[in-house]
């Protein structure tokens, strides 16, 4: 019979039987004093910060591949980050409304935990729509850049669940099981769902980086993002069914994230297949490249302007020389008669 276990065990030692006697027992956070106050920095936050920074810098590096300037990525992040956090919280509150309906002020207590990734994705997408419109960048091109960075962030971010000893699956005896041993309790072996999802996303990231970007197989704006949605949604739908901490649609036994993941994966796959044979507008990066190729004609024309402007000055010089020639001719003519008269007189 399966033992009832908490969905988070920050004080548990971690082991993997497939790795022999290896056991990890590090603290979930570090507490320190500053100006008379105690502060705690959780490993979860450190890993999530690393995931965020990796995603941002990867996006800035790959942005030119879709026609976006690297600097624009950082301006986008300033908008997306806070709004995505709000979206994560709103999604969680809606899914767990019974927990908050009698204590509405606790909705603001985000530091106590309770966020959902899909809420951040939705809020982030809406923010990108507005940002892209303001920047006059095709929304689909921005999504391509965002999707490729997001999956890298998810590869790293899932390890935050590992250090927090949370988001694991049901108890199992599978070869890759993870052992959790709390002080005074027996070891329980569970599905390391964080590891499943991280490895799945890593495979997707490698496909995006080496196939879609390096080989430049992206045929139209939005294609890479559709692949990301299909890949991530497929993996999440499979892994979510193993987790013990899923959020459910109120009044049903349907896991919210599993349903959203499965539906989004099916829709993305359908759109990818439909768009295989359809004609598409030129990619934003190609439009910019074509404009840049024509750009040298402008400066050349501007350079030619001043050159032509010098011509009147040369013409003036030539005119001055032309005037000087008649003057010399007139002087010569005047000298001629005088000389003739002199000769006549001397003769």
Image (cartoon, rainbow, N blue to C red):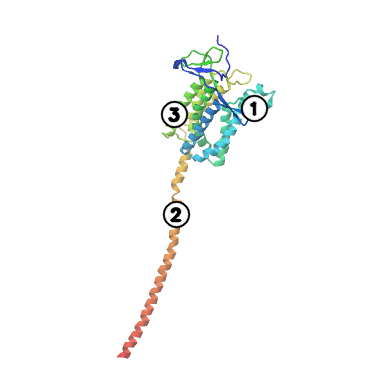
The answer to whether 240 is drawn above or below residue 37 in the figure is above
Packing grade of label 2 (10 A; few <14, some 14-19, many >=20) is few
Toward the left, the furthest residue is 347
Q: Nearer the viewer, residue 113 or 307?
A: 113
Toward the top, the furthest residue is 1
Helix, strand or loop under label 1: loop
* Point 45% across, 61% down: residue: 309
| Rendered-image quadrant of the C terminus | bottom left
- Between the C-alphas of marks 1 and 2, the distance is 62 Å
Question: Are discs 2 and 3 less than 8 Å apart at CB?
Answer: no
Query: Residue 203, how many percent across, how many down?
Result: 45, 26
Question: Does label 3 or label 1 sit earlier along the sequence?
Answer: 1
Q: Name the residue under label 3.
A: 206
Q: Mark 2 points at which residue?
A: 301
Please name which of the two marks, 2 or 3, marks the residue nearer to the observer: 3
Packing grade of label 1 (10 A; few <14, some 14-19, many >=20) is few
Question: Does label 1 or label 2 sit earlier along the sequence?
Answer: 1
Helix, strand or loop under label 2: helix
| Rendered-image quadrant of the N terminus | top right
Q: In which quarter of the image is residue 128?
A: top right
The answer to whether one can see residue 81 in this image is yes
Task: State the mark number for residue 109.
Answer: 1
Query: Residue 308, how many percent across, how many down?
Result: 43, 60
Helix, strand or loop under label 3: helix
The answer to whether one can see residue 282 in this image is no
Please name which of the two marks, 3 or 1, marks the residue nearer to the observer: 1
Please name which of the two marks, 1 or 2, marks the residue nearer to the observer: 1
């Amino acid at each position: 019979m399966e033992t009832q276990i908490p969905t988070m065990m920050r004080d548990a030692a971690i082991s993997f039987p497939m790795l022999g006697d290896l056991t990890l027992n590090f603290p979930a956070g570090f507490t320190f004093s500053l100006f008379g106050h105690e502060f705690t920095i959780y490993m979860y936050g450190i890993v999530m910060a690393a995931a965020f920074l990796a995603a941002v810098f990867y996006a800035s590096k790959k942005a030119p591949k879709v026609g976006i300037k690297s600097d624009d990525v950082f301006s986008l992040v300033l908008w997306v980050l806070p709004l995505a956090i709000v979206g994560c919280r709103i999604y969680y509150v809606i899914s767990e409304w019974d927990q908050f309906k009698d204590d509405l002020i606790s909705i603001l207590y985000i530091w106590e935990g309770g966020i959902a990734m899909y809420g951040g994705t939705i809020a982030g997408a809406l923010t990108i729509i507005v940002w892209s419109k303001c920047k006059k960048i095709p929304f689909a091109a921005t999504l391509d850049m965002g999707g490729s960075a997001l999956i890298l962030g998810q590869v790293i971010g899932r390890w935050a669940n590992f250090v927090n000893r949370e988001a694991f699956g049901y108890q199992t005896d599978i070869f890759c099981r993870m052992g959790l041993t709390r002080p005074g309790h027996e070891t329980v072996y569970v599905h390391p769902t964080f590891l499943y999802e991280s490895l799945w996303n890593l495979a997707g990231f490698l496909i995006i980086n080496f196939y879609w970007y390096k080989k430049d197989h992206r045929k139209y704006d939005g294609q890479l993002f559709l692949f990301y949605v299909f890949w991530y949604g497929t993996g999440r739908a499979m892994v979510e069914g193993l987790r013990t901490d899923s959020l459910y649609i109120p009044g049903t036994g349907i896991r919210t994230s599993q349903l959203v993941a499965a539906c989004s994966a099916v829709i993305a796959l359908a759109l990818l297949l439909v768009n295989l044979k359809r004609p598409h507008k030129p990619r934003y990066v190609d439009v910019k490249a074509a404009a840049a190729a024509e750009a040298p004609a402008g400066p050349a024309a501007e350079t030619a302007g001043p050159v032509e402007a010098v011509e009147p000055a040369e013409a003036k010089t030539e005119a001055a020389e032309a005037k000087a020639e008649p003057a010399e001719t007139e002087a010569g003519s005047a000298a001629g008669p005088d000389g003739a008269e002199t000769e006549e007189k001397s003769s």
